[in-house]
Image (spheres, coloured by chain):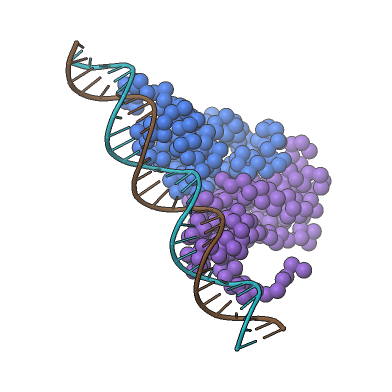
Chain colours: A purple, B blue, C brown, D cyan
Amino acid sequence: MTQGKPRRSDATRAAILTAARERFAADGYERATIRAIAADAGIDPTMVMRYYGNKEKLFAAAAQIDLRLPDLTMVPPDQVGTRLARHFLERWEHDETMAALLRAAATNQGASHRMREMFATQLVPVVAVACPDPAQAPARAALVSSQVLGAALCRYVLRLEPLVTMPADDVIAWLGPTLQRYLTATGPAV
Amino acid sequence: MTQGKPRRSDATRAAILTAARERFAADGYERATIRAIAADAGIDPTMVMRYYGNKEKLFAAAAQIDLRLPDLTMVPPDQVGTRLARHFLERWEHDETMAALLRAAATNQGASHRMREMFATQLVPVVAVACPDPAQAPARAALVSSQVLGAALCRYVLRLEPLVTMPADDVIAWLGPTLQRYLTATGPAV
DNA sequence: AAGAAATGTCAACAGGTGTTGGCCTACGCT
DNA sequence: AGCGTAGGCCAACACCTGTTGACATTTCTT
């Protein structure tokens, strides 16, 4: 269904997408130029337009993210925090698309919209099964987001020492209990 | 020392700075144009150049931030987390300059450098007096930053519900214990 | 009152941006 | 083989960017 005929230009399309992700991750939305992306991909800027319409649609295609969140029902209730922290950190460590979306979301409306959408459709459902009352899931998910995105911001975007050089395991050990509390503890407004 | 003769153009300079802060906060560094800032201030774009040299210096002047952090030695040790959380939230709520710096820091090198500098010179010293071993201050300060900046990012930049509409007191109640733990709890790497 | 300095205005430059249309080439089908 | 079409490149447009220089005007100094 989602798969059409293989086109002769599939390699080019993929090269564009890869280059776009790198540029968007490194420079953000506005400073990543179509010309630079095309140059990285070794093709003409016109191709980008032909295959993706315009810059906004190119970004939308490049910033398609699947968080691949684990099913928390399979995780011991007292370990969901650390489990989530580890998952996010590894995800971020191996996929620059996440940084691309984060950097762009700071100034680009479409990107921030996509960011909200991503957490609403992917994180909230996962949180819902791990917290005492599913109705609290949006609030708890937002709190989790605030810590996860904040850590990513400091470590990968702002490059704030010593968070950059701190071993991933240490970061996870610090963030785990925080997420655990946001997921399961009783807080204000129930 | 820091105060020279009052100049006839002080009003203009101030108007430029105010308009610059608004634009940088709303649009980020690259999308905030000198022309738009000048238009907001009701003057000619050339004036911006004359008084601030170039766009980068204008931003540097506009994003000068004093966190006005409280002296934590005066705060009961078990309340430093909540105290800090409240301070940051109020600070953010009333000064759009913070949002300007955050938005810009995502894509602009100078801005992210300034951000790091700000936390190193202002937050680390304050954290040092509140944590068991002053040598751990940089790491603990970075963790505090990650949560504070993350919350600000979600609430003021990404506008991620329900964090946007959540009462400030609730946010503080959630973040307080997190900061408290980052400041005082024993964690990995001592 | 005369000269110097500061303040402001106008037009323009040089470079980069997203985006478009035209043209040539090379593949895939019949 | 011949043709249609998709893939690819080139030149260019229209616009916007930060920035500069020349000129007019007001204010301060002497």
- Seen at 62% across and 75% down, the residue is A8
Q: Is residue D8 left or right of residue A7?
A: left
Numbered label tally: 0
Q: Position of residue B98 (x, y in %)?
A: 53, 36
Q: Is residue A2 left or right of residue A36?
A: right
Q: In the image, is residue A105 above or below residue B70? A: below
Q: In the image, is residue B26 above or below residue A76? A: above
Asked where in the image residue C1 lies, by quadrant, the reply is top left
Q: Position of residue B163 (x, y in %)?
A: 69, 40
Q: Position of residue B64 (x, y in %)?
A: 44, 35
- Seen at 59% across and 69% down, the residue is A14
The answer, for residue A49, to whether it is visible in the render is: yes
- Seen at 62% across and 50% down, the residue is A111
> Toward the viewer: A152 or D23?
D23
Q: Is residue B78 left or right of residue C2?
A: right
Q: Quadrant of the N terminus of chain A?
A: bottom right
- Seen at 58% across and 47% down, the residue is A108
> Toward the viewer: A52 or B81?
A52
> Toward the viewer: A39 or B124?
A39
Q: Quadrant of the C terminus of chain A?
A: top right
Asked where in the image residue B16 lies, by quadrant, the reply is top left
